[in-house]
């Protein structure tokens, strides 16, 4: 048996609309970006965290899933929230498009949104 431990440590999103996409995530989630050139930025989720989020200005997002669908095209990145309704309102106010409004799933509730570069992500709130 292989004893190597593998962990997800980096998520990279296509961001052909890099400036607006940076502003969107900064406004909704408070993320502060580090610029690594004109087409690439990254955000370390928290100091010493094992995961970072990158935006690639030269990549293209996959086609979006159907409205009100519970899946996405390609990997689905989920973020957690302690106030799902407030987060959904903040996503909309920052220019994100709600593609699946809040719905229940086993273990909690979530919604999906499209960011300014066309990426589909989800936000969930687990049942307490």
Image (cartoon, grey):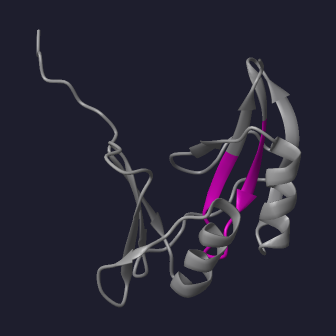
Q: Is residue 67 visible?
A: no
Q: Position of residue 67 (x, y in %)?
A: 83, 54
**Which residue is located at x 74 percent, y 57 percent?**
113
**Which residue is located at x 64 percent, y 53 percent?**
121
Of the 4 image quadrants, the one containing the N terminus is top left
- On screen, residue 57 versus residue 126, left or right, reads left
- On screen, residue 57 versus residue 70, left or right, reads left
Predominant SS of the magenta segment: strand
Is 32 contained in the magenta span?
no
Q: Position of residue 26 (x, y in %)?
A: 60, 70
**Which residue is located at x 64 percent, y 60 percent?**
29
Is 121 contained in the magenta span?
yes
Q: Compared to 59, does 89 lie above or below? A: above
Residue at the far top in the pictured view: 1
Q: Compared to 7, does 38 lie above or below? A: below
Q: Compared to 82, does 100 lie above or below? A: below
- The range drawn in magenta is 110-122
Residue at the far front in the pictured view: 47
Q: Is residue 91 visible?
A: yes
Residue at the far bottom in the pictured view: 38
- On screen, residue 41 versus residue 62, left or right, reads left
Q: Position of residue 115 (x, y in %)?
A: 67, 68
């Amino acid at each position: 048996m292989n004893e190597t431990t593998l962990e997800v440590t980096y998520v990279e999103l296509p961001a052909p609309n890099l400036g607006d996409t940076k502003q969107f995530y900064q406004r909704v989630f408070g993320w502060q970006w580090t610029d690594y050139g004109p087409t690439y930025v990254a955000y370390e989720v928290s100091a010493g965290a094992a995961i970072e989020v990158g935006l690639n200005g030269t990549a293209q997002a996959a086609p979006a899933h159907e409205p009100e669908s519970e899946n996405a095209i390609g990997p689905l990145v989920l973020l957690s929230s302690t106030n799902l309704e407030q987060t959904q309102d903040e996503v909309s106010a920052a220019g994100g498009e709600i593609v699946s409004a809040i719905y229940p799933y086993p273990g909690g509730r979530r919604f999906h949104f499209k960011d300014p570069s066309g990426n589909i992500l989800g936000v969930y709130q687990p049942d307490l």
